[in-house]
Image (cartoon, helix red, strand yellow):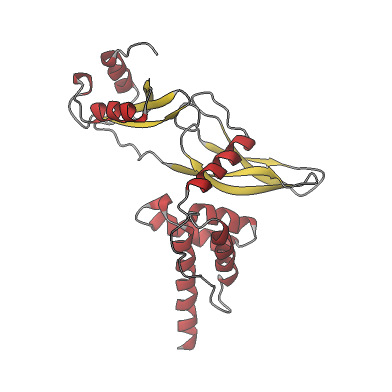
Amino acid sequence: MKPVDHQALARRMQLLPGVEHLVHVYNSKESGEAGARRIRKATNPAYQPAGTYEAHAHPHENGTAVWARYVAGVDVAPLPTVMTVRVAECIGDGDVRVAAVEISARCQVCGGPRGEVFPYRFRRDGAADLVCDVWGNPCGHVDYDEAVLAEVRRREARRPKDRPSPPEIKGVEGGRYAGAVDAIAEALRAAPWTRAKTAALFLEELGHGEAAEVVRAFVRDYPTGGMASARAAALYLISKDEETSGEVAK
């Protein structure tokens, strides 16, 4: 890449507050992270005073990319690290299923932000309508289903395998949300890191619409929002059923 005119770039970011800009692609992760720190701490005079700009280093096909945005005096939401999407997956004999998965919120080619997600309804071989998600990345790189599923497999492979398994969760017998809790427990056996937002999606697909809405409300009220785990959501559903059973007992 050409040398960066940091003064010009800083002024350009001020004109579009909250919008990320590609600063530079570094050869190594270490140099990229150092470049991001120089922007955040304003050791480069173009970005003074410290805290005026936010910057992060992300993997790029040619190294490590630094993306930054102007945030001084601007009410901007924190940048997400993951996103939940529904993707179509072939499962043999021409059948297709829609799976809710968690992927990085960053483009896997350039490290830029992925685009806004929209539902897309489709039908295959006369079957009932299916709904997956589509999005267009501002950087122009296209995320095909095959690449997204490969990313999911890579993320799964990086998960620590030696952590002790948490206690099994089980729905309250006869509880309103028992089926939903058991569905989450089944999903957690295959993917213990699943987030509550993902759980809400597949609960709706499985016909547990009321439980899905309760989980979404739980995510909205959770201190870290979208970082809430599916396990925490299941425990919340269990607590709601236990409250109800306690009231009945009285």
Instruction: Name which quarter of the figure residue 202 lies in.
Output: bottom right
Nearest to the observer: residue 137 or residue 38: 38
Residue at the outermost bottom position: 250
**Relative side of 51 to 157, left or right:** left
Instruction: Name which quarter of the figure residue 49 lies in.
Output: top left
Give percent across and percent down for residue 90. Answer: 72, 44
Q: How many marks?
A: 0
Nearest to the observer: residue 75 or residue 201: 201
Q: Is residue 175 above or below residue 218?
A: below
Q: Which residue lies at the image location 51% right of the left edge and 35% below the top edge?
A: 116
Nearest to the observer: residue 156 or residue 95: 156
Give percent across and percent down for residue 174. Answer: 58, 79
Give percent across and percent down for residue 103. Answer: 51, 42
Q: Which residue lies at the image location 35% right of the left edge and 40% below the top edge?
A: 78
Give percent across and percent down for residue 83. Answer: 49, 43
Nearest to the observer: residue 208 or residue 101: 101
Instruction: Name which quarter of the figure residue 124 lies in.
Output: top right
Q: Is residue 204 above or below residue 68?
A: below
Q: Is residue 88 above or below residue 8?
A: below
Q: Is residue 139 above or below residue 233?
A: above
The quadrant of the picture occupied by the N terminus is top left
The quadrant of the picture occupied by the C terminus is bottom left
**Relative side of 46 to 116, left or right:** left
Q: Which residue lies at the image location 54% right of the left edge and 25% below the top edge?
A: 141
Residue at the outermost front position: 162
Q: Which residue lies at the image location 32% right of the left edge and 22% below the top edge?
A: 13
